[in-house]
Image: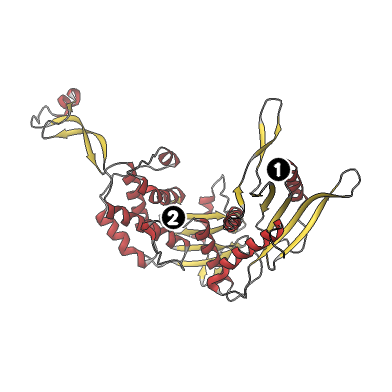
Amino acid sequence: MTSRAKHITIFEHQAIRLDQEIGGVKFDANKLKALQRYYGEKGVPYFSLIHNGIRFNNFVGVIQVGNTIIEVLPKADNIFTEKEEKAQWHKILIDMLFEVGFFNVQSPSNSSLKLKPNAILDLYFELFIKEIEYLLHLGLVKKYRKKEGNISALKGSIQFAKHIQQNLTHQERCYVSHTSYDVEHKLHQILYKAIKLLKQINTNAGLQSRIGALLLHFPAMPDIKVNEATFNTLTLNRKTQSYKKAINIAKLLLLQFHPDVSQGRNDVLAIMFDMNKLWERFVFKSLSKNKSLSVKPQISKHFWVSSDGDLSKMRPDIIIEMGKETFVVDTKWKNLKGYNPSPEDLRQMFVYHEYYAAKKVALVYPNKENNTITGNYLKPESRELSEKECSIISIAISSKVDNERLVKTWQKDIETKFTSWIGMTND
């Protein structure tokens, strides 16, 4: 039976300590110990251990500990009122994930996700359920596999050594090796394991009956051990291409699940996203909407070679090309709070200017207000202004915009600011 989920909602870079109560839910010793075990000796990038607590890093998403869901939200600035802050950033995070394709709902099997306003875990769970329902509707793909064992009729080739060993007193049986054409293969074993995991960890009562129906209609499969190598060896062909999304979600769930072997009550499932990468991808997708621009992600160039022949690369976040002109952009998910970018970031942009023969380069930040500050690098000999220009572009998400249009307005502002910066329009 599904236990009702408890929700804790905090922001990136915030800490949560032992016995702290957030939203009526206490962060007790069992939850802390479960996350400490999950952290282990090698650590995880999502959070750091502190005295009697944890501090989250620049990752957002959800961590489920037993029946408690800890939702970690982004926060660029104090844009919203305290009362609406968590609800607004929750929506922004979900919409950003949809926009960059983490929830790809364009296939026929995903015409609508009913749980969009809810937690990220619910979205992944329902998306997975809809994929399995779709595959069952299409009919599960069969494959040939080799089988070996005792059967009552001769089929395939008899294995004499094992036949004599096992059937001296059972002459009505034959120990044979033969080929079977059925649904028992690795793809279905992985999916069945993920469905059973869903049954175990789901806390949304609205999904429980659908998960039960899947277990009823999906053929039972033998349990298999799953690791990264299991998925690396999978190959999809024309017949099994429809399994891609379900397998990807199963991979996410199975590899990110860490059972609590000591107590069995505080299993950990983490689905977290690097906010720097999410912001980079979001800016890229927003700029790509302008069909007048050629927008390319992360084009590498070699910039150093050792005497042993080893090469080092540089890779800016976004390259924009308009005609013969090149513009280089790096995204940073942090608030400058009125200060200049770090010298390291400015030096990095200077190198991009040189190696990509850029007309302009820019650092892009989220902020409370839209703003562009332009600066020029100095010539090393005379300390006079050079023609090499680096801009600081701040993109605001406004608290005055209707809730349904927050992210869309943000995207439009990104496109407008960049076309102005490039010189396609006037500010």
Q: Which residue is mark 2?
A: 267
How far is the residue under mark 1 from the one under mark 2? 48 Å
Query: Which of the image's four quarters has the N terminus?
Result: bottom left
Q: Which mark is residue 356?
A: 1
129 or 160, nearer to the observer = 129
> What residue lies at 36% left-to-right and 57% top-to-bottom?
109
Q: Is residue 6 above or below residue 318?
A: below
Residue 19 visible in the current orientation: no
Residue 242 lies left or right of residue 120; in this view the side is left
Please name the amino acid that badge 1 sits on. Tyr
207 or 378, nearer to the observer = 378
Residue 392 visible in the current orientation: yes
Can you give x and y, in whole percent of width and height, for residue 220 in the image?
26, 49
Residue 425 lies left or right of residue 143; in this view the side is right
Q: In what element is the residue under mark 2? A: loop
| Mark 2: few/some/many CA within 10 Å (<14, 14-19, 20+) | many
> What residue lies at 65% left-to-right and 57% top-to-bottom?
333
Q: In what element is the residue under mark 1? A: loop
